[in-house]
Amino acid sequence: MSMNWFWRRKVKKELRLWSEQVLNRPSPFFNGIAPCPYAVNAMRNDQVKVCFGKLGMLNQIMEEWDDSHKLVILVIKDYNQFPIVEWACNLSNRIYSDSDLVAMDFVPGEGIDTGQPDSEMTDWTHVVDEPYAMIFVQRVSELTAASRSLASRGYYQNCTDKFKQYITEREHNHARKEEDHAEEGQRQEDHEEEGHACSAG
């Protein structure tokens, strides 16, 4: 077996430990709620798919989405691609803006800071020494529903203003898309009704 196979196996183990020891640990910062209270169950119920490759795989993941998993994580080992991971996510989100899917970047040392104390995120069992980037792909509607539920429980009260703004903008964008789709559906229904009326006449 190749060293690459062992590395991928270690990454999957590390992601599982991360979900159990960090994302599932209740935090005073998040009003006593775990940073991601849904992560462990998603992992244990095989609702998370982990892929390995380069940025070119992102469009394929979004194009071939079939809801067999709630979350797909694209792990990127190529350090040279780290600087353009955010750009790639933004581009794919524009291309697939009508799909109810969103790609979110996670690059070591970058991204929007929630404000959570470093001590809560660093005290866990690391398995992999080399840094790697990740892209999380999931349905915006499910993500928005989860965010609203957490917000009602005071989850975001201590978060940075920048992170709160990010969450608000994501929800507004999703709501606007839903309105656009509803209007388009109504226009289509009106057009069909007009067609039927003309046929009947």
Image (spheres, rainbow, N blue to C red):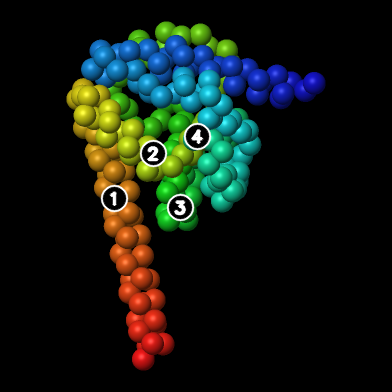
Q: Residues within 10 Å of mark 4 (few under 14, many from 20)?
A: some
Camera sees residue 32: yes
Q: In which quarter of the image is the C terminus?
A: bottom left
Which residue is drawn at the image coordinates 60% and 44% (left, top)?
Answer: 57
Secondary structure under the numbered disc 4 in the rendered image: strand
Q: Residue 142 carries which label?
A: 2
Query: Hey, what amino acid is under mark 1?
Result: Ala
Three-letter code, disc 2: Glu
Tag on residue 99?
3
Mark 2 touches mark 4? (CB < 8 Å): no
Query: Which one is earlier in the sequence, the residue at label 2 or at label 4?
Result: 4
Q: In which quarter of the image is residue 2?
A: top right
Residue 175 - label: 1
Position of 5 compared to 130: left or right?
Answer: right
Q: Which residue is drawn at 45% across and 52% down?
A: 99
Q: Would you place residue 97 above or below residue 143 in this image? A: below
Residue 168 vs residue 84, the one in the foreground: 168
On screen, residue 184 versus residue 1, left or right, reads left
**Residue appearing at x 44%, y 11% in the figure:** 21
- Distance between mark 2 and mark 4 Cα atoms: 10 Å
